[in-house]
Amino acid sequence: MTNLKIAVLVPDGAADFPVPDLGGRTPLEYADTPNADRVVSMGATGTIATVPAGMPPGSDVANFSLMGYDPAVHYGGRGPIEAANLGIEVPPGWTAFRCNIVTTDGERMLDYSAGHVSQERARAMIEALDESLGDPRTRFYPGKSYRNLLLLEGDFVGVECTPPHDITWQPLADHMPKGPGAQRIVELMEGSKAALAGPGPGGTAPPPDTSVTMIWPWGQGSWIAMESFKSRFGLDGAVISAVDLVMGLGKLAGLRPLEVPGITGYLDTDYEAKGKAAAAVLDSDDFVYVHVEAPDEASHMGSAEEKVRAIERFDELVVGPVLLSVETRGEYRLMVCPDHPTLLSTRTHDATPVPYAACGTGIEPGRGRAFAEREARSGGPHFDPGWTMMLHLSGRKAWPHGPAG
């Protein structure tokens, strides 16, 4: 195939289990998604096992798979991926952590995002932390909102750290870092309480704020090297996301991280801007990977209403415009696929294979008519391991037919 244009559209965490409040349907089944349904009717629907057995069902592992890289080979923690997007070098012998700003009541995790603290306030807080707790072996770096970075000299990769979005309302004592080296991290977490309670030594902290009470480091790893997307799949392109994790993966793969004004990584993100930017990428490039965080955030909130709304806006303002655009470009392929399920019932991620909808050149229409979990399980092809999907979507291998992928 020549001049093939490819778009992958990722509604983070959109897959789910049946929800009683939605009449026993999943949010994807309940939501009005005419554009994703049209992709199914024009092409194929099946499942992708994005999380290999024994690996954590995080967006880092799952997006590795969707981009066509085997997580068992390439995954080394979320921290260094986010550092890559921020242009922060992880020196040899150092460990990079995702460093959330969180809210607790002293005993339980109340909010993994500190109320989705603003960018301006989060930056001031991280600067205060670096001033009060930073030293030649400890560095804090601002990211986006509650998503920040901590670099520590030494090997802390083996420390057991729990993602804070997995433990809402749960006791902190049950989930503090464990293992060799954990004491150093716990000391920083305890020290952060004072640093965030008021002005630091240089007066750089914001006024006291009861919604921000401490840091929560997790997702640690060392530097990651990846084969370029161009050499692996023969495609140039861009990544569009509001979160450093996905943008960092794009950078590590040699894809262009495209900054889009108005996107936030939350429910208020500018879906329309993402859809327009994705269509524009394909004017000059072969490939675009669009990631929208909102369904995942709604799931962590436990709000079925917000999750359905996020899915519907994604379908209308991202899937619709990109589908319309690629259909005018000759040879194309488009895939809609969550990275992993995020369950409303538990407010956290799950490793169950996710549904996809794919259409375009060489993808023969099947019998599917709707983009949803149960229909996908009865369709096909199915991709397990999930990272092999990109070999077929990119045209490096023929698109398989039937249930076996």
Image: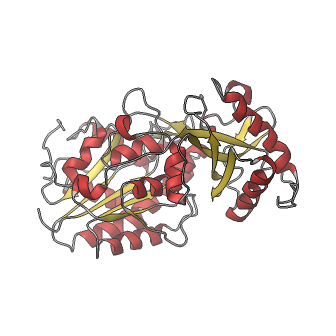
- Count of numbered circles in the view: 0
Determine whether, in the image, residue 47 is placed left or right of residue 117: left
Q: Residue 116, can we see it?
A: yes
Q: Which residue appears at 81% of the width and 50% of the height? A: 132
Q: Which residue appears at 28% of the width and 72% of the height? A: 325
Residue 123, picture quadrant: bottom right
Nearest to the observer: residue 99 or residue 88 = 88
- Which image quadrant: the N terminus? bottom left
Q: Which residue appears at 66% of the width and 37% of the height? A: 168
Q: Position of residue 217 (x, y in %)?
A: 65, 40
Nearest to the observer: residue 316 or residue 294 = 294
Where 8 sits versus 326, above or below?
Answer: above
Where 375 sits versus 365, above or below?
Answer: above
Q: Position of residue 326 (x, y in %)?
A: 25, 69
Q: Which residue appears at 56% of the width and 34% of the height? A: 346
Determine whether, in the image, residue 359 is placed left or right of residue 48: left
Q: Position of residue 383 (x, y in %)?
A: 25, 39
Where 316 sits versus 153, above or below?
Answer: below
Q: Position of residue 294 (x, y in %)?
A: 52, 55
Q: How is the image coloured?
A: secondary structure
Determine whether, in the image, residue 247 is placed left or right of residue 69: right
Residue 238, picture quadrant: bottom left
Q: Residue 344, can we see it?
A: no
- Which image quadrant: the C terminus? top left
